[in-house]
Image: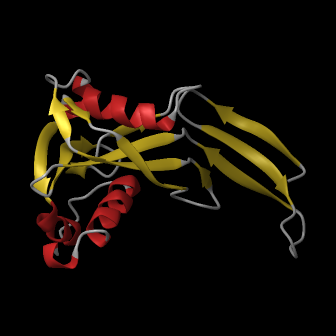
Amino acid sequence: MHGSRRIYENRWVNLDLVDVEPPGVARFEHHVVRLHHVAITAVVDDQERVLMLWRYRFVPDQWGWELPGGIVDAGEDAAVTAARETEEETGWRPAKVEHVVTYQPMIGMVDSPHEIFVSHGATKVGEPTDAEEAGHVAWIPLNEIPRLMSEGKLMGSGTLVALLHLLSSRPTAAR
């Protein structure tokens, strides 16, 4: 990269015009959307259920299931964010959160690192404290995930990545 110029900026999204010269390609300018670093948590209980939120999202104008998650605050460890957001959005405090993967959901156009965590178990500590984010909180059996996916009722790439990880790592007999 030869340089970058900020075109638009606010607390949620930044748009940069970057001057790039990838290997074997002529130099060109490219727009890059820069979003926040986020952490998402799949909490699984001993009954093979995952803690999820039924929420409305106005951009696609639809209701769907999501895993708890949110923005990693400046200087905050993503594992701390994963646990904090789960508790704020669901009222459940996850047991130890374990990092699964970090990925970019729209590589090439958008910079927004997503970190996926898994927790085996949680303790109910109260009601959700983030009413805007909470929606309806429920424990969904992992066996229902493929159906929900085929019906288009799972929203967000972080939710899909985490749930696919859980399904692929289950013992063969549980599938």
Residue 56: horizontal and vertical position, in percent? 22, 43
Does residue 32 appear to the left or right of 38 in the view shown?
A: right
- The vertical placement of 115 against 153, above or below, is above
Q: Is residue 133 visible?
A: no
Is residue 93 or residue 65 the one in the foreground?
Answer: 93
Q: What colour scheme has been applied to the protein in the rendered image?
A: secondary structure
Residue 173: horizontal and vertical position, in percent? 15, 78
Residue 32: horizontal and vertical position, in percent? 68, 50
Residue 73: horizontal and vertical position, in percent? 52, 27
Q: Is residue 45 visible?
A: yes
Taking the spot 88% from the left edge, 76% from the top edge, the residue there is 24
Q: Quadrant of residue 140?
A: bottom left
Taking the spot 80% from the left edge, 39% from the top edge, the residue there is 5
Total numbered labels placed on residues in the image: 0
Taking the spot 83% from the left edge, 67% from the top edge, the residue there is 22
Q: Which quadrant, please, contains the C terminus?
A: bottom left
Is residue 57 or residue 91 the one in the foreground?
Answer: 91
- The vertical placement of 174 against 127, above or below, is below
Is residue 49 or residue 69 the one in the foreground?
Answer: 49
Taking the spot 30% from the left edge, 55% from the top edge, the residue there is 155
Does residue 131 appear to the left or right of 12 in the view shown?
A: left
